[in-house]
Image (cartoon, helix red, strand yellow):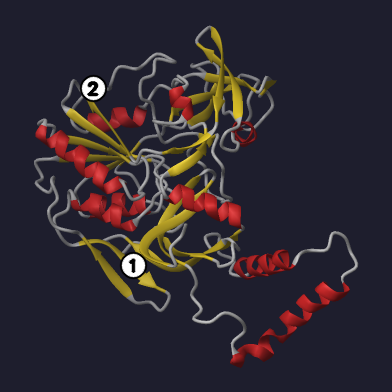
Amino acid sequence: MVPSRFGLVLVAIVAGSALFMGGFSLGARVATTPGTPADQETRFGPFWDVYSLIQSDYAGSPRPSQDQLVQAAIKGMMESLNDQWSYYQAPEDFANSLLSVGGQAEGIGVQVQLQPVDPASTQSCTKIGDGCEMAIIKPIVGSPADAAGILPGDVIATVGGTSLDGLTLDQATALIKGKEGTPVTLGLLRGTQSIQKTIVRKVYSQPEVEVRTLANGAVAYIHVTGMNEPASSQFDLALSAALTAGQHDVILDLRGNPGGYVADAVKIASEFIPSGVIAYQMDSKGKTTEVTATSGGHATDPSTHLVVLMDGNTASAAEILAGALQARGRAKLVGSKSYGKGVVQEWLPLPNNFGGIHLTIARWLTPARVWIQGKGLQPDVPIDSSNARAGTDPVLDAGLAQFGLPPEPAPSAGSGASTSPGAGASAGSSPVPSPAPSPTAG
């Protein structure tokens, strides 16, 4: 159920099965009255003429329904904007978007990547087979795959008894995705062992924050997977616990974070930045508004050292957070260039179950007034992890090096140890169409 009007502000793009946010307000309608305004009747006359002619005289088959004609008209208006972030979604797709906004997904819940079968190979993999395989980076905590005992480093060889040889990553993950309550059987290779796992897809909650300790308890590692509503409160608890335990070296991992609520990005940034600008927002008329830090952060004292990990799937509200920490001199960014989304959308659920639209209404800028659209944030410590295998994490190792610490011991394949969360694609969740790269596979 969507209330008639929300005052929520988010940042939004949609990527594969993940929702990238960049700042939007969610409402039920913008027009005060439905229908054609009296002063626009002449302009809309041709539209109604065509609509009526199709209804009365079109002799082709199948004849579109009235609803289909209206949806096509809305879609055409959005496409005329030539803006990849402004688009129409049919009812089911829009509902999936709202599901993702709520921190949920539908599927089995695994992150996957293509990699060479030979760990020593530098082969570039575009399809499965001919020396390439699809490996699981990790199961999503709390997902059906997690409950079924799927482990990082497992290789998916078959889906439903069908070999994946010759398929692209998108084609293979499409076989894993499906509706809630339906089963899928994965044929896995775990080292030299062959395993069959039948997993029932379901709607599951995606944790926004994952925590562990590194360097024998000296470093707090906090992975923020999204910026949906629970993120800032979960992060606050995790950071407070770390500081209480005497951990004043913190790694904030934003890899694979598609964004979410601007308010959550601001709250997390405010844990480290005591006051001043977090970002600027510029509306369609050129008016610029400051987005400022809130007081009461737990780690504003510079004695708490911070490193931020990012990658090409760090997007939108996650970029607002990373950009603020970098521009305000509070953290070094380690990894690869971020996604580069600097625009803000309004999401509008349409009445009568007609789906909804995403409409760009503003752009956002860093505290240095830099617009990152199409450019992304540049890391202070660039690390190329494109050839990293599932179960290894050179970006995390580089983050630890910023504290003068050695890398974590490399886990063996299928050991269940944490792996790089930002690479690969997502399989097993219902996707929403988008041109952006997909950071998870369901």
Which amino acid, by three-letter code, is at mark 2?
Answer: Pro
Q: Is residue 343 above or below residue 121?
A: below
Residue 269, percent from left and from top: 23, 51
Q: Is residue 252 above or below residue 50?
A: above
Residue 377, percent from left and from top: 36, 50
Residue 220 lies in what quarter of the image?
Answer: top left
Residue 286, percent from left and from top: 38, 77
Residue 150, percent from left and from top: 47, 21
Residue depicted at 9% across the width and 31% down the height: 246
* Whether residue 388 can be seen here: no
What residue sits right under mark 1 in the picture? 281
* Whether residue 426 can be seen here: yes
Label 2: how many residues lie within 10 Å, few (<14), some (14-19) or many (20+)?
Answer: few
Task: Locate residue 423 relative to residue 197 in the image: left or right.
Answer: left
Residue depicted at 54% across the width and 44% down the height: 16
Which amino acid, by three-letter code, is at mark 1?
Answer: Gln
What residue sits right under mark 2 in the picture? 406
- Do residues under tags 1 and 2 come within 8 Å of each other at their CB atoms? no
Task: Locate residue 237 relative to residue 104 in the image: left or right.
Answer: left
Residue 196 lies in what quarter of the image?
Answer: top right
Residue depicted at 41% across the width and 40% down the height: 256
